[in-house]
Image (cartoon, rainbow, N blue to C red):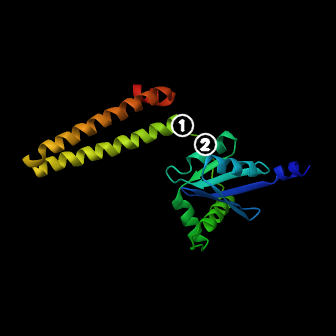
Amino acid sequence: MTNLKKRKNKINVGIDIGKYFLDICIHEKNEHWQVENTADGIKKLLRRLSYYHVERLVMEATGRYEFLLAQAAHEKGLPVCIVKPLSVRRFAGAMGQLAKTDKIDAAVIANFAATMKPGASPHKSKNLIAIKDLIARRRQLMCLRTQELNRRSMTGKPFENSCKRVVQCLDDEILRMENQLAQHILQQAEWAQKKSI
């Protein structure tokens, strides 16, 4: 009976994402705790949240560190909201909250969740994330290639052969990235259509 009552309580959860730890705050309960940002830590977190009706689970976009949690929460059917850090910082500033610790950040994110009520973020498949990562990596390699081509024209004959070898190495790696990207795109229906267009 108590479990059923607990499940009816709607909560807004704020999570401060770190490389090694997740700091969690339930806004309505003013509860704070921390788990490791690992599969086991996330499992414990989701088990604890299963006693409530989670209205939204809000975390800031970090680039990568929120991925495991977002995936696991989506699989459990939780409304995951990945928000821009700047939005949360502006909200904190408007509330006069200038201090920053992981615990405070989790509480600010939970307050942001309850007050601003951000919409749920779409679930991104592992394949889609791999595509985005490969595109980012290709872009990095292209920048390195351009830098090396610029160096070759600036340093002249003494280092021309060295620059050519580095450019060839980068060309090979770019081709590898493009081949992997092509394989992932074929698995992502909407991206395959874009590629054909």
Task: Give amino acid for label 2.
Answer: Gln
89 to 146, vertically: above or below: below
Measured as percent of width and height from the top left, residue 171 is found at: 26, 36
The numbered disc on residue 84 is none
88 to 70, vertically: above or below: below
Count the labels in the image.
2
Which element type, helix, strand or loop, lies under badge 2? Answer: helix
Whether tag 1 and tag 2 are in contact, CB under 8 A, the answer is yes
* Residue at the image position 60 percent from the left and 65 percent from the top: 102
The numbered disc on residue 126 is 1
Gap in Å between the C-alphas at discs 1 and 2?
8 Å
Measured as percent of width and height from the top left, residue 159 is found at: 12, 47
Residue 76, quarter of the rendered image: top right
Is residue 40 visible in the rendered image? The answer is yes
- Whether residue 13 sits left or right of residue 17 in the image: it is right
* Residue at the image position 75 percent from the left and 52 percent from the top: 48
- Whether residue 40 sits left or right of residue 144 in the image: it is right
Measured as percent of width and height from the top left, residue 93 is found at: 56, 70
Residue 183, quarter of the rendered image: top left
Q: Seen from this angle, which residue lies furthest right? A: 1
Q: Nearer the viewer, residue 180 or 95?
A: 180
Which element type, helix, strand or loop, lies under badge 1? Answer: helix
Task: Give amino acid for label 1.
Answer: Lys
The residue wearing badge 2 is 71
Q: Nearer the viewer, residue 143 or 11?
A: 143
| First in residue order: circle 1 vs circle 2 | 2
Quarter of the image where the C terminus is located: top left
